[in-house]
Amino acid sequence: MRTADVCPIHSEEMAEAYCLKQLPECGAHCFEEHFILCSRCAISVEQTQAFVDGLRSLYAPRLGRFAS
């Protein structure tokens, strides 16, 4: 388990991959254990998730009209 004082080198990219569900299950689990204790990474995940959710809510209705 990673400790809170050792952030991934590219924590913003890790947060993005986590929020977009692009990390393998074991990687997501390790990152979850880390950002629960690390406020810097937790904030990054929170901000990234808000951004992703905002984009989805903005574009989902528009994309739905093209669905078959």
Image (cartoon, rainbow, N blue to C red):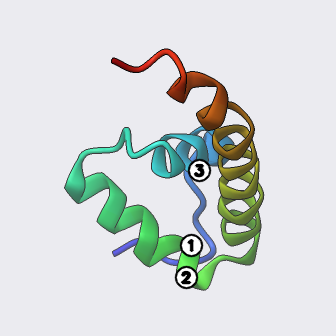
Mark 2: which amino acid?
A: Ile
The one of 48 and 27 positioned closer to us in this rendering:
48
| Residue carrying label 2 | 36
Badge 2 crowding class, 10 Å Cα cut-off, few under 14, some 14 to 19, many 20 or more, is few
Residue 10 screen position, x and y as percent: 62, 40
For the residues labelled 2 and 1, say whether their Cβ atoms are less than 8 Å apart.
yes
For the residues labelled 1 and 3, say whether their Cβ atoms are less than 8 Å apart.
yes
Mark 3: which amino acid?
A: Ala
Residue at image position (59%, 50%) is 15
Left or right: 13 in relation to 20:
right
Residue 44 screen position, x and y as percent: 73, 58
Look at the image and tell me in which quarter the C terminus lies.
Answer: top left
Residue at image position (24%, 45%) is 24
Residue 36 screen position, x and y as percent: 55, 82
Left or right: 21 in relation to 29:
right
Secondary structure at badge 1 equals helix
The disc at residue 7 is: none
The disc at residue 15 is: 3
| Residue carrying label 1 | 35
Q: Earlier in the sequence, mark 2 or mark 3?
A: 3
The one of 11 and 43 positioned closer to us in this rendering:
43
Residue 59 lies in quadrant: top right
Residue at image position (49%, 72%) is 34
Residue 6 lies in quadrant: bottom right
